Image (cartoon, rainbow, N blue to C red):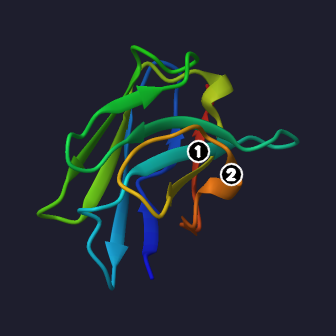
């Protein structure tokens, strides 16, 4: 059983940055891919980025490429999402999630077995 806890959200102005963290308790993340999703009010949850275990290969949604960076620190049992050049349309609750395997696949929600509780990111002037 993997328990995930997100942190690092907040209120920022357009153009500013945040770093989100996804920490695991009770188990190691070393063999799990980790993905970040977000859900804006009135919209469906969408995949943002994923990092595999082992090779740490990464994928990004087109809407965040060049602005967001995902990374992992297995020694700290934590995955990070660096959010740069934030825009108002990035406002959402951000969730991390893990499938029961080490590789990133697509962002189909039911392929992810473990979810955190989410952290709010608000981008507003």
Q: Which mark is residue 37?
A: 1
Residue with the most extreme left position: 75
**Which one is in front in this view, the residue at disc 2 or the one at disc 1?**
2
Q: Position of residue 108 (x, y in %)?
A: 67, 44
Disc 2 from disc 1: Cα separation: 9 Å
- Pointer 2 residue: 109
**In the image, what residue occupies the spot 42% across and 28% down?**
59
Q: Position of residue 86 (x, y in %)?
A: 50, 24
Q: Position of residue 99 (x, y in %)?
A: 50, 59
Q: In what quadrant of the picture does the N terminus appear?
A: bottom left
| Quadrant of the rendered image containing residue 118 | bottom right
Question: Circle 1 sits in a helix, a strand or a loop, which is it?
Answer: strand
**Residue closest to the eye, 73 or 114:** 114
- Answer whether labels 2 and 1 touch (C-beta < 8 Å): yes
Q: From the viewer's perspective, is 45 left or right of 11?
A: right
Q: From the viewer's perspective, is 42 left or right of 94?
A: right
Q: Which mark is residue 87?
A: none
**Residue closest to the eye, 47 or 95:** 47
Question: Vertically, is 59 above or below 23?
Answer: above
Q: Position of residue 45 (x, y in %)?
A: 73, 44
**In the image, what residue occupies the spot 20% across and 48% down?**
54
Q: Residues within 10 Å of mark 1 (few under 14, many from 20)?
A: many
Residue with the most extreme right position: 42
Q: From the viewer's perspective, is 44 left or right of 105?
A: right
Question: Vertically, is 2 above or below 39?
Answer: below
Q: Residues within 10 Å of mark 2 (few under 14, many from 20)?
A: few
**In the image, what residue occupies the spot 45% across and 16% down?**
65
Question: Vertically, is 89 above or below 2?
Answer: above
| Quadrant of the rendered image containing residue 4 | bottom left
């Amino acid at each position: 059983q993997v328990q995930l806890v997100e942190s690092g959200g907040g209120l920022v102005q357009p153009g500013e940055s945040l770093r989100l963290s996804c920490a695991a308790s009770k188990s190691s993340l070393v063999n799990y891919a980790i993905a970040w999703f977000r859900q804006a009010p009135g919209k469906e949850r969408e995949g943002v980025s994923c990092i595999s275990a082992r090779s740490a290969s990464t994928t990004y949604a087109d809407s965040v490429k060049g602005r967001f960076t995902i990374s992992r620190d297995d020694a700290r049992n934590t995955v990070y999402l660096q959010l740069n050049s934030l825009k108002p349309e990035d406002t959402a609750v951000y969730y991390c999630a893990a499938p029961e395997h080490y590789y990133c696949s697509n962002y189909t929600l039911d392929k992810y077995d473990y979810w955190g509780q989410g952290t709010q990111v608000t981008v507003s002037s």
